[in-house]
Image (tube, grey):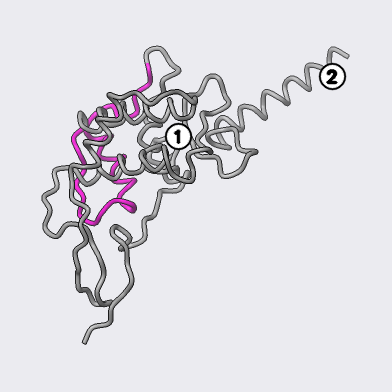
Amino acid sequence: MHSTQRATVRDQPAARAPTLAEAQLAGFPVGGEPLALDLVDTLVTVTDPPTELLTDESRSRAFWALQAGRLPAGATPPSLAATRALRAATRDLLEARAGGRQLPSEAVAVVNLAAAAVPFSPCLKLSANGWSVEPACGAPDDGAWALASVARSAIDLIIGDTATRLRRCANPECSMLFVAETARRVWCTPNICGNRARVARHYRRHRAALDA
């Protein structure tokens, strides 16, 4: 008789977010945030025109490969068009939430549709380690699982425990969003915007000393 393990849907195995170093090595300046934020931060909106980090299907697949550790096992990468469409709606939602504005209904509809596109009913699976719970036995996947994961991440950011800690980088020349673990965190990354701020402070102090 096989032993029974306690498990929750999508918790087998435990989700692993990429580290900031791994994201930057892959060409993405921000990483290791909640999944929805990692996707949103692949578009730099403060430049004119916006700087697109998902420039083609290959770069889109690279993003999804980076996030594979927190997607359902076997999830396939969505198309570039589908990825960008959900990213746009997710950014609209999170920008509104971070700015204390009303959530745009069109973006809410897009995110809800992505979240509802796949079943989340539990399914018992037997492995060498015993029984575990996985979602939707045999459910087809054309990228829908990955998109649904982003949508669920966005919903959690809107109403979950981290909602009040959603921030936009304090650098006026940066559009990156992040979740602040502490009240002291104001920069998206310590080695990009945080470092720029330190360099600027040093320059101001140096100029002030010269002018004194």
For the C terminus, the image quarter is top right
- Whole-percent x and y of residue 205? 78, 22
Residue linked to disc 2: 209
For the N terminus, the image quarter is bottom left
Q: Residues within 10 Å of mark 1 (few under 14, many from 20)?
A: many
**Amino acid under disc 1:** Pro
Label 2 to label 1: alpha-carbon separation: 34 Å
For the record, the magenta segment spans: 50-79
- Whole-percent x and y of residue 92? 36, 25
Which numbered tag is attached to residue 168?
none
Whether residue 137 sits left or right of residue 83 in the image: it is left
Residues at discs 2 and 1 in contact (Cβ within 8 Å): no
- At 32% from the left and 43% from the top, the residue drawn is 152
Q: Which type of secondary structure does the marked residue at label 1 adopt?
A: loop
Which numbered tag is attached to residue 29?
1
Question: Which badge, 2 or 1, is on the more N-terminal residue?
Answer: 1
- Whole-percent x and y of residue 151? 30, 39
In the depicted structure, whether residue 161 falls above or below residue 191: below
